[in-house]
Structures are given as C-alpha cells and as structure tokens.
Amino acid sequence: MSILRIRCSPQGLSSESYRLSERIIQRLQANQPGDKLDVIDVDATRLPHADSDYAAALSSPADPLDGQLELGTLKESARQIQLLTDASHLVLSTPMHNFTVPSSLKVWLDHVVRVRSTFRITPEGKRGLLANRPVYVAIASGGAFSGDNAGQPDFLTPYLRHVLATIGLHQITFISVEGTARGPEFLEAARKRADAAIAALSFSATQPAFAV
Ligand SMILES: Cc1cc2nc3c(=O)[nH]c(=O)nc-3n(C[C@H](O)[C@H](O)[C@H](O)COP(=O)(O)O)c2cc1C
C-alpha cells in the first residue's frame, strides 16, 4: 500500500497545495494504522514535455518495438505509468492556473494517459486499463471557483474527472483551499473549511487498487 503524490506547484514545498496534500496524507495514514502507507513523491515541475519519439509512438497504430521503448520520453512515460500502477492511492497536489490545471500537471497527464498502456480505443470510445483506486486532489486557488461566491469558471475539476476516468480512475475526491490571494483572514477561513472536509472524509467506499 502506498501513496503516489504528484506535486505540481512552482512553489514546491512552501506551496498551499502541498500543505493541503500533507493534511490529506496524514488523514489517509491515520485511517490505516496497521498498514503503513509509504509516500512516493514526483515533482511534476521537473518532468520533460512529451518529445517527438513519444508523439510518433502515440500516433502510430502499434507500440514501438522492444528496442525502441527507451527512446526519448517514452522511457519517462513508462516510469510514470509504473509508479501510478504500483500505488494504492493517488494524491494530486495542484494550484489552479488560468482556470484549469497548471502546465506541470498537464505534462504528467500526457505521460500517463497513453493509448495501449493505460487506455484503449473501442467502438464505444476510450476505455481505461488501470485498476480503479482512490484519488485525492488538493487544490489551491487565488480566488474562489466553487460555491455561491465563485468568481470564475472551473475547468480544472471537470477536466480532471474526465481525463482520469479515461484511464480507469473514477473515485475522485476534490478538496480545495480557495481564495489564497484574499488576505490572511480569508486564507485562514478557507484552510479551516478544507480541514473540516478532510476530517469528514469517509473511507467506507474506498477500494484499494489492484481490484480490476
Ligand atoms: C500562472 C498563474 C495562473 C493563475 N491562475 C489562477 C486562476 O485562474 N484562478 C485562481 O483562482 N488563481 C490563479 N492563480 C493563483 C494561484 O492559484 C494561487 O496563488 C494558489 O494559491 C497557488 O497555489 P500553490 O501555492 O499551491 O502554488 C494563478 C497563479 C499563477 C502563478
């Protein structure tokens, strides 16, 4: 049992989304006292963009031959898919950038949402190949994007729901600290709301991975 955390903020360990993900992970670990949940961290801001070898492989009707699987970012993609496959839980720690995911998270998604590896194309559409597992998304945003006070559209949560479902991950929980740019009092209140949401998390429906 392990948690794969994808860190997507340019502000690294001092980011609000990282702080929030830490609280979620503490709650997950407290829920599994007998079963140690190791945390494996990936800093998505350091991942390379998909390159030409990768793009060529994904746009061809078959995967490259064995000897070519190490070419360019195909190797990084294989590594990220293996980390994801091995994890029983996924935590995405991400800011909102321009109403959606930051480019770092998009780069990670481009590595793991891979035809013939994590989804296949059928006459009925794309079908996920990964075992379902709990996914927690820790979001920090400068303004509000949910609730009555939302002052902007939210292309982050619907996009993540869709793209993660494409590879077989359907059990998504979003927890957010919204309004980080609105001053310390507002931030404190937003953190308290997030803490309450974390405390209220229900694990009854949580299915560990490897259940396909
Ligand atoms: C490039 C960029 C784009 C941003 N776009 C938005 C946005 O569309 N909506 C929003 O509410 N905040 C936006 N912000 C503010 C961040 O979401 C906010 O500062 C957040 O708390 C950062 O979280 P972090 O500390 O985890 O990086 C943006 C920040 C940056 C750097």
Image (spheres, grey):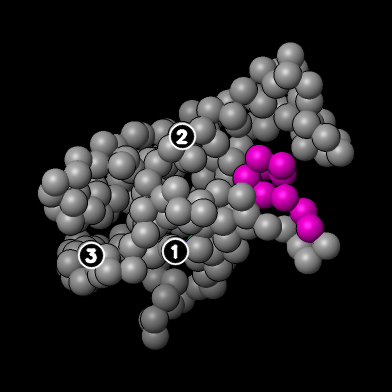
Provide the residue designation for mark 1: 171
In which image quadrant can residue 31 be found? bottom left
Judged from the image, the secondary structure of the residue bearing numbered disc 1 is strand
Q: Specify start and end residues of the magenta stretch as a single range.
A: 113-122
Judged from the image, the secondary structure of the residue bearing numbered disc 2 is helix
Local packing at callout 2 (Cα closer than 10 Å; few below 14, some 14-19, many 20+) is: some
Residue at point 51%, 33% (across, down):
82
Residue at point 37%, 46% (across, down):
88
Residue 111 is situated, as x and y percent measured from the top left of the image, at: 61, 37
The label number, if any, that marks residue 83 in the structure image: 2
Q: Between marks 3 and 2, how big is the CA–CA gap?
A: 25 Å
Residue at point 24%, 42% (across, down):
37
Provide the residue designation for mark 3: 198
Q: In the rendered view of the protein, which quadrant contains the N terminus?
A: top left
- What amino acid is at disc 2? Leu
Residue 36 is situated, as x and y percent measured from the top left of the image, at: 19, 40
Front residue of 35 and 155: 35
